[in-house]
């Protein structure tokens, strides 16, 4: 059984026991979060129930493991022969959650 959820304008395919890194949720470690934007749910036989846009009454429950920052991404701009060089970096804040139930 798996579900497709939306969090932070991104979609994730999750199953019970999966550990997923989503956009920062701003919750305490060990707290519980409920994802109610469930786009699709597949049962044990593999039959897929797709919502329009979400599946009514479907919820995915998860436990917050920790909040961390991702690896740094370096953005480098350059125009050749002009002496123009700019370097900028970005580190995204993420939350690691463990999926506990799909209802």
Image (tube, rainbow, N blue to C red):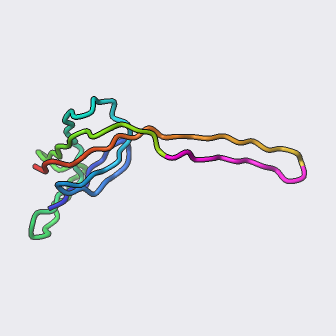
Q: Main secondary structure of the magenta part?
A: strand
Kindly identify the residue that appears in the image at 17 percent across and 55 percent down. 16
Kindly identify the residue that appears in the image at 79 percent across and 44 percent down. 85
Kindly identify the residue that appears in the image at 32 percent across and 44 percent down. 96
Q: In this picture, is 12 found above or below 92?
A: below
Regarding residue 40, the answer to whether it shows in the image is no
Q: Is residue 23 left or right of residue 40?
A: right
Residue 65 pos. (x, y %): 27, 40
Q: Over which residues does the magenta segment extend? A: 71-81
Is 10 a magenta residue? no
**Which quarter of the rendering shows the N terminus?**
bottom left
Q: Is residue 37 left or right of residue 69?
A: left
Q: In this picture, is 72 found above or below 4?
A: above
Is 75 a magenta residue? yes
Regarding residue 43, the answer to whether it shows in the image is yes
Q: Quadrant of residue 28?
A: top left
Residue 83 pos. (x, y %): 88, 45
């Amino acid at each position: 059984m798996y579900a497709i959820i939306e969090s932070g304008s991104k979609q994730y395919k999750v199953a019970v026991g999966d550990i997923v890194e989503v956009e920062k949720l701003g919750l305490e470690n060990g707290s519980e979060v409920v994802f109610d934007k469930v786009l699709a749910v597949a049962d044990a036989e593999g039959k897929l129930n797709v919502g329009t846009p979400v599946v009514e009454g479907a919820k995915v429950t998860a436990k917050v493991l920790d909040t961390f920052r991702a690896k740094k991404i370096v953005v480098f701009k350059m125009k050749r022969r002009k002496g123009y060089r700019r370097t900028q970096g970005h580190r995204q804040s993420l939350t690691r959650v463990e999926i506990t139930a799909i209802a």
